[in-house]
Image (cartoon, rainbow, N blue to C red):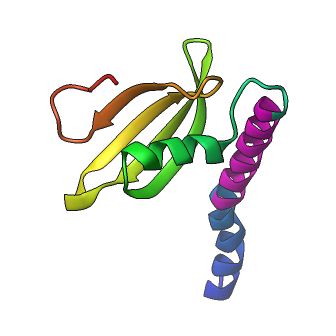
Amino acid sequence: MPMRWTVALLLPLLAMPAALADADQDQDQDRARAAVEQGRALPLRTILDRAAARFPGQLLEAELEEEHGRLVYEIKLLMDGGRVVKLHYDARTGDLLAVKERGTEKDRRP
């Protein structure tokens, strides 16, 4: 098989994981939007404002997850000195549930 045909056949296969990841992200956003509209979660902006007030850092990632039957926002921040802090907030109430720092022995509870 000529090289150009091999490349032509492989390109769609290489693009599939990215397309699947985009589809998953769209579903996650739809679930998060529905949770906010139904009053089961506060808007992400509210949670990010609370996080920034106590933990000034650069946002790396924000996710809405279900943990033990409740919705939890997981916020990852890059802090001064290169520390990564993971914050868990109750999505419905906005209460800070846990603070985890990469490289520490124990998680801190608020």
At 46% from the left and 56% from the top, the residue drawn is 59
Q: Residue furthest front?
A: 53
Which one is in front, 54 or 103? 54
Q: Quadrant of residue 78?
A: bottom left
Which one is in front, 18 or 26? 26
The quarter of the rendered structure image containing the N terminus is bottom right
Q: Which residues are magenta?
A: 18-36
Which one is in front, 17 or 27? 27
Q: Residue furthest top?
A: 69
Residue 18 in the image, given as x and y percentages of width and height: 65, 60
In the rendered view, does 95 fall on the left or right side of 91? left
Quick check: 80 above or below 99? below
* Total numbered circles: 0
Quick check: 53 above or below 109? below
Q: Quadrant of residue 60?
A: bottom left
Residue 54 in the image, given as x and y percentages of width and height: 38, 43
Residue 88 in the image, given as x and y percentages of width and height: 46, 31
At 67% from the left and 73% from the top, the residue drawn is 11
Q: Is residue 47 magenta?
A: no
Q: Main secondary structure of the magenta part?
A: helix
Quick check: 19 above or below 32? below
Residue 64 in the image, given as x and y percentages of width and height: 61, 35
The quarter of the rendered structure image containing the C terminus is top left
At 76% from the left and 49% from the top, the residue drawn is 26
Q: Quadrant of residue 27?
A: top right
